[in-house]
Amino acid sequence: MPLITLFSAPKPFTDPHIAMIQRNAIKSWTLLPDVEVILLGEETGLAEAARELAVKYLPNVARNESGAPLISSMFQLARENSNGGLLSIVNADMILVPDFVEAANQAVKLKDKFVLLSQRWDLDIVKPIEFTHGWEETLRNTAYAAGSLHRPAGSDFFLFPKSCYTDVPAFTIGRAGWDNWMIYKARKEHWPVIDCTPSVMIVHQNHDYSHLPDGKPHYEHPETNENIRLAGGQANIRYTILDSTHQLVDGKLTRPKISYLRFVRNVELFLRAIFFFLPENMIENIARPKRWKKRIQKIFGNR
């Protein structure tokens, strides 16, 4: 029985670059120990890719009016068809290496309910990866040398026990907001939000937005507004990795070190709890006045 069920709704395999990076990603998942993979949707080329990579394929995911898969349906299908005790939704352009499974093994020993996430490394990859001996170390060295650690906003995977996230709204995947809500939900339920950036390298293969309507980033689309509504408003989609309650370091859970960004975020959350009746942008302006920035950065460093 696998430890983790990875599930994802890839984009169509029509664009050569998108097809290539998705095959890179999914192939890396299949090489992980104690993992099964489920691909969801009816996108062009997906069934063929699932057969090629020998992974489970479920086409009957619910969609919105424009044809984009719904997160709620993805979670339901993954839960119903998984054999693992842990579920992980992951974007289909993310390359994973075995430290991902190691982090999951450590987290499940430490906590009953939790969500595991991390920052990603952005890297230009223009050809298929040769998954030969030592490919993980080669990728890691390349990411350190030529890639960049993405800022702590936006999450490309969430890993959690099956008992968590049983009531996910009908968010549209590929649009903004739903990933922030995942962190908000965990904080609301008092589940540990574990940032495993110090212990895990996940590599995002850079791409453009030509697969989206008008080639615009996801946060510029009307469906993002619907995601925000389903999330309960702007305040619930402001949560990022900065709102993690723990970090996984050397197999142990620690409290995140204070930094300028974390300090400002904590101030904002405190003020929102007290002045809940004030407009959201007013709270943000109070929590983040420009005149504070240089003074606080002197205390915490520019982190």
Image (spheres, rainbow, N blue to C red):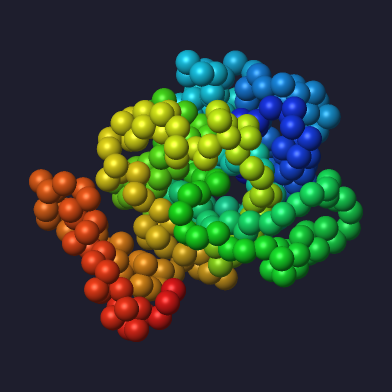
**Extreme-front residue of the structure:** 214
At 44% from the left and 37% from the top, the residue drawn is 220
Q: Choose top left, top right, bottom left or bottom right for residue 223.
A: top left
Left or right of 133: which side holds 282?
Answer: left
Residue 76 appears anywhere in the view: no
Question: Which residue is more in the foreground, 230 or 223?
Answer: 223
**Residue 51 shown left or right of residue 288 in the figure:** right
Q: Give how far across and how far down residue 116 sits, in percent.
A: 50, 52
Q: Is residue 295 above or below residue 156?
A: below
Seen in the image, is 104 located left or right of residue 12?
left
Give the percent coordinates (x, y) of residue 131: 85, 50
Point 29% across, 66% down: residue:
264
Q: Say which quarter of the image contains residue 287.
A: bottom left
Residue shown at the point (51%, 45%) measured from the top left: 158
Q: Nearer the viewer, residue 260 or 85?
A: 260
- For the C terminus, the quadrant is bottom left
Residue 203 seen = yes
Q: How many marks?
A: 0
Q: Position of residue 250 (x, y in %)?
A: 57, 70
Residue 238 horizontal/vertical position (percent): 34, 49
